[in-house]
Amino acid sequence: MSEEQDPQQMLMQLQQTQQQLQQISMQKEETESEINEAKKALNQLEDNEDGKVYSAVGSIMVEKDADQLEEELNDKVEDLEVRKKSLAKKEKKLQDEMNESRESLQGNMNLG
């Protein structure tokens, strides 16, 4: 970021980065919640003794093969873990950008 930039424009960029960071953080939390739900379902599958399992399809429950459902849940967890890592990288990048913008803005304000 150039030191000659207008402080007001720099502040707007900082606020925009902060909003993006909040959105990424919320997406990351939602992803973590989905991971926890899928893992909880996997634990329930392990405890299932009668062999019948059901999966929600829209607003109805459909009987499914336990092995197939377990595979689907494991795939879902794996995909969500990848998404979580991607969001964490974006979050780190935005935090770095925000810190850099904040330092640049403070430096600009001190010079002015």
Image (cartoon, helix red, strand yellow):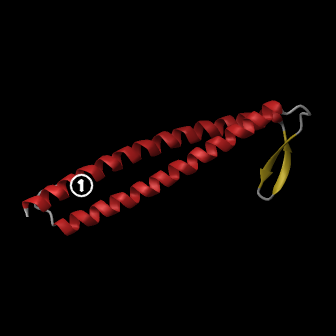
Report the side of 75 relative to 5 (left or right).
right
Q: Quadrant of residue 2?
A: bottom left
Above or below residue 45? Residue 23 is: below
**Looking at the image, can residue 2 be seen?**
no
Check the image and name the residue furthest to the bottom.
Answer: 8
Residue depicted at 29% across the width and 60% down the height:
14
Q: Position of residue 79 (x, y in %)?
A: 58, 40
Check the image and name the residue furthest to the front.
Answer: 110
Q: Position of residue 53 (x, y in %)?
A: 85, 40
**Looking at the image, can residue 24 be seen?**
yes
Residue depicted at 48% across the width and 39% down the height:
85
Check the image and name the residue furthest to the right.
Answer: 50
Q: Quadrant of residue 9?
A: bottom left
Q: Which quadrant would the C terminus be assigned to in this image?
A: bottom left
Report the side of 93 relative to 70 (left or right).
left
Report the side of 84 relative to 72 (left or right).
left
Q: Position of residue 107 (x, y in %)?
A: 14, 55
Query: Depth check: 88 or 102 in front?
Result: 102
In the picture of the structure, the residue carrying the numbered disc 1 is: 101
Under circle 1, the secondary element is helix
Residue depicted at 45% across the width and 53% down the height:
24
Three-letter code, disc 1: Ser
* Crowd class of label 1 (few under 14; some 14 to 19; many from 20; radius 10 Å): some
Q: Quadrant of residue 43?
A: top right
Residue depicted at 73% across the width and 35% down the height:
42
Query: Depth check: 40 or 63 in front?
Result: 40
